[in-house]
Image (tube, rainbow, N blue to C red):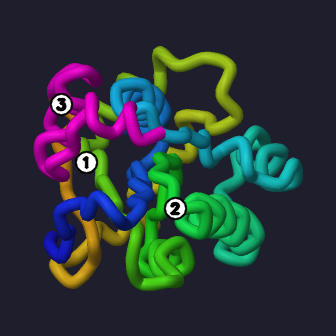
Amino acid sequence: MGNVASPDAKRPLVLVLMGVSGSGKSTVGALLAGKLGWDFEEGDSLHPQANIDKMAAGHPLTDEDRAPWLRSVADWIDERLDAGQNGIITSSALKRAYRDVLNRRGEGVAFVYLAGDRDTIAKRLALRHEHFMPPALLDSQFGTLEEPTVDEPATRVNIGPSPSVLVNKIVEKFGLDASAERSRS
């Protein structure tokens, strides 16, 4: 994976934490946003109720189901970029086509792919409660997943370490300065 430019102090950056359900997007995203002082949005909160109901009933989403949600996530990204603000949002962004929707401008967006094996993620999902995405849909997520390629603005981060270690790795990979970022917010 490549094409992830270092942040430019004059240009806003939105990080999209992506990966299958249970990869740690929400936890890492909230910690990272807190460390940097950036806006944070839990992408799942932008799903239409029909999508939530469908997943809660154990049915995987189709591309048609995902389309309005992806537009909402992309709108959130564009709002940050238009305002000149940095931000962090979570989105499974499982397919290249979905990532293309989220990065419709072709700049200002970088994907952080939280990668892990099926067994590790299944164990995490088994411990998670009160989330509409049931563990039974994990195989459908892995079946849909198209890992980012070298021509996408993406960085792969293995989910093995603790969330705080992952946050530090992301800050380091992107050359972010938490103290400087907070003072710009």
The answer to which of 106 and 42 lies nearer the viewer is 106
Q: Amino acid at mark 3?
A: Asn
Q: Amino acid at mark 2?
A: Gly
- Residue 24 appears in the figure: no
Question: What number is the disc on residue 5?
Answer: none
- Residue 147 appears in the figure: yes
- Residue 61 on the magenta span: no
Where is residue 32 drawn, in percent x and y?
36, 32
Q: Amino acid at mark 1?
A: Ala
The image shows residue 39, relative to residue 160, as above or below, that is below
Q: Quadrant of the N terminus?
A: bottom left
The image shows residue 170, relative to residue 124, as above or below, that is below
The answer to which of 169 and 127 lies nearer the viewer is 169
Question: What number is the disc on residue 84?
Answer: 2
Given contact means CB atoms under 8 Å apart, are the residues at marks 2 and 1 in contact? no
Residue 109 sits in quarter: bottom left
The answer to which of 10 and 44 lies nearer the viewer is 10
Where is residue 104 drawn, in percent x and y?
52, 83
Please name the predominant secondary structure of the magenta segment in the image: helix
The image shows residue 33, relative to residue 128, as above or below, that is below
- Residue 164 on the magenta span: yes
Taking the spot 41% from the left edge, 78% from the top edge, the residue there is 96
In the image: residue 150, left or right of residue 16? left
Q: Which residue is mark 1?
A: 115
Q: Which residue is mark 3?
A: 168
Sequence-wise, the earlier of marks 3 and 2 is 2
- Marks 1 and 3 sit apart, C-alpha to C-alpha, by 16 Å
Disc 2 crowd rating (10 Å Cα; few below 14, some 14-19, many 20+) is some
Sequence-wise, the earlier of marks 2 and 1 is 2
Q: Nearer the observer, disc 2 or disc 1?
A: 2
What range of the chain is rendered magenta?
Answer: 161-185
